[in-house]
Image (cartoon, rainbow, N blue to C red):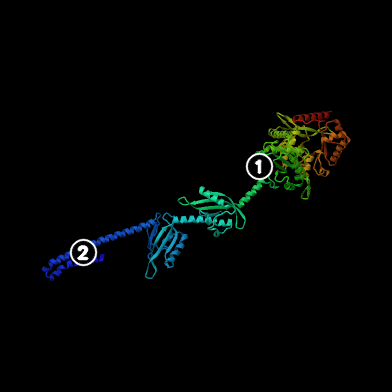
Amino acid sequence: MQFKTTAFCSLILLAFFSWPVAAAAINWDKIQPYLFHAVLAFAVAGLLLAQFSLRRMRKYHKALAKSEERLRLSIWGSGDELWDWNIETGELYRSSAWLEPVETQPLTKDFPPNKSLIHPHDLERVRHALSQHLAGHSPFFEASYRLRTSNESFIWVLDRGKVVAYNDEGKARRMTGTLKNISQLKQAEARMQLFARCLENISDAVVICDTKFYIIEVNPAYSTITGKNRDEVLQTRFQLTLYPPRFMQDIEKTLVKSSRWSGEIRELKTNGDYYQAELTFDVIKDEQGCITQYVAVFSDISDRKKREAELSRLANSDTLTGLPNRAVFMTKLASLVTDKIEHALLVFDLDNFKKINDSLGHELGDTLLCKLAERLHHNKLFRQKLYRLGGDEFAILLDNTNDIHAITSLAKALIEQINKPFAVDQHELVVTSSIGIVLFPEDGKDPQALLRNADTAMYHAKSSGANRYLFFNDTMNKQAVKRLQIENLIRHGLKEDYFTVFYQPKMDMLSGKVVGMEALVRFITPKGGLISPGSFIPVAEETGQIVDIGTVVLRKACLDVKRWLDQGLFHGRVAVNLSAKQFMLPFLCDQIDDILQQTNLASYHLELEITEGTVMQSPKLAIDTMKKLRARGIHLAMDDFGTGYSSLAYLKQFPLNTLKIDKAFIDDMNNARGRNMVDTIVTIAHNLSLSVVAEGVETLEQLEQLRKLRCEIIQGYYYSKPLSADDFATFLIAQKKQRQTQLSV
């Protein structure tokens, strides 16, 4: 249209300027008026037509500009960039609509273009996709990859393009496309992939259900735990086969109300095995807050439950016998007391069980306890009533009864069952038991008091000859209180140094000289004065405090003797008693070495007295310990010889220096049989090359009889009672003056 209008105007102008030439050939005068008006009309028409054409041209350009602006804004709004690549020249145009611009080279011969900006891990994939399209193997080019931005970070882009022009040879000449920033999509995709991997690999089963509890999806762990295949459970209703339908209805009500339900369940696997799981249901809601799905997560806790059951069994059962242990017993006893239910408590242990352990070994002792527990547990009288409190101590609880006849009948049956022989490792063992019995509420208002009083009654049963039962009474309680007071007093005495040492001299029968002394412990309190050894020593031996007392006596005796040696008052030995517990200490020899070193006393001046009963508890161990002591130059004496049950076979193996004749034999010397007994002991000692000490000598008659029997050393009230350290020093001074007087005469 534009071309036609221009041509028409050109013709009019041509005619106008050619007018003078034509007028020369025509009669000007005739045609001049008409021709002028015609030319003028044509000129006006041409001008009008040109103006109309210009207006239409402006309107067209305006519409084109709006279209271009709309296209530019649409592309900018979409976040895409346009690119145009001249493949032959390498010229690359790219619009810049991103907030994170990419610095590209306008002219590049790289393939792909600007490959330096593409992440090295993505480069080969982009090159392959572009080569495939340029070769005509794909309808368009498309690749997602990471692209470096101007701030040296990478963004994910989706690059799409197509060849739009080919050269004469049919090769791609021009290619255009778009570049889209898909970093957010990639992040969302990575998150989704992460969630998917977590769901796939999580050890807990995950089940997604619709609002009717029909299964939409499950993860592999669900199949592992339940044994059910994914395909067979999809679109089936989630159910717990071991629970009534109302159970799932209650879960749904809780979910609607609280959006969450959790609990432990027990369910069947497809193979028929049971499993236990910790199940949690949560709701998924849409943007309007409406429930769209339920998500169930459950983990198999079967192994944990088994471990908990085993731990509970271990916590509540005695590891050796399998009986309920002390913790269960105390809980049961406390429950009976709290509910004020009448009941009886029987506490018993085996008499002399320690001797079985020491002589036959702890392993055999444990086997004996197991056989005892098994025998009593299988007896209907004691089943569900028997507990092991520890060591060889057991208890029986009788609910809802205070019937003395029923209780004593059961106690007698218990003793009868225990007295039956036990076959243990080719040994036939016959054991006895002592039983203490208390009644609630008569004998105690709380579990601790009941157990304490039952122990007290058992202790008195054992002291009364063992293999019997005793009911608790108030007299026992008073004795128990007294015993506890003495125990506390001993503890306080050790702390405040209330234990001191008295000495009783040992005199040579022939010369009348002091050849030694026995160190005797005395317990003197500021308020109570002297406490009898017969009161505190049995308690100290039972509680083990005798070990600390023995250490105090040994150290003080060594210090006193060292002082008297330095003063020239004495040149013999001090005899210190070793208790059974002290003698069995594994570090006894090291302890004695330390005391001798600290007091600077030569071992020659120390004699240790060991009772016959002590060494016979474990003869082999005793011999080994005695040899170690003798190797240090320490003298050893057997105290109270003849009162125990040692055999001559063992006596000759003991590395002893001295035998001490017990006072009971000395007191019995007023008759022939008694004198013969002492004579026999002296003869045995001399035949074993041992010296003899007679203790408890109080009369001249006893002294003369012992002289005739060739007893070398005398100890007793005839010469002196036990003296304090200061008084004994005075005694030694007097003895020294007496000797000097005798020499001067």
User: For residue 7, what is the image quadrant?
Assistant: bottom left
- Residue 346, given in percent of the width and then of the height, sits at 72, 41
Seen from the viewer's position, the closer of residues 133 and 494 is 133
Q: How many labels, in total?
A: 2
Instruction: Indicate the quadrant containing the C terminus: top left, top right, bottom left or bottom right.
Output: top right
What is the spatial separation of the Cα atoms under label 2 and label 1, in whole angstroms? 122 Å
| Residue type (three-letter) at the residue carrying disc 2 | Gly
- The outermost residue toward the left is 29
Extreme right residue here?
672
Residue at x-position 66% and y-position 48% = 313
Q: Is residue 240 left or right of residue 545?
A: left
The image quarter containing residue 185 is: bottom left
The residue where tag 1 is placed is 331
Relative to 151, say whether 621 is above or below.
above
Lower position in the chain sequence, tag 2 or tag 1? 2
Measured as percent of width and height from the top left, residue 485 is found at 70, 33
> The residue under label 1 is which amino acid type?
Thr
Q: Which residue is mark 2?
A: 46
Towards the viewer: 11 or 209: 209
The 10 Å Cα crowd at callout 2, few under 14, some 14 to 19, many 20 or more, is many
Q: Which mark is residue 26?
A: none
Element at label 2: helix
Front residue of 336/192: it is 336
Question: With 569 as the anchor, is 233 left or right in this view?
Answer: left
Q: Nearer the viewer, mark 2 or mark 1?
A: 1
Residue 533 lies, in percent from the top left, at 75, 33
Q: Label 1, secondary structure: give it.
A: helix
Which image quarter is the N terminus in?
bottom left
Q: Are marks 2 and 1 in contact (CB under 8 Å)?
A: no
Asked if one can make out residue 709 in the rendered structure from this viewpoint, the answer is no
**Residue 473 makes an appearance in the image:** yes
Residue 579 location in percent, x, y?
A: 75, 38
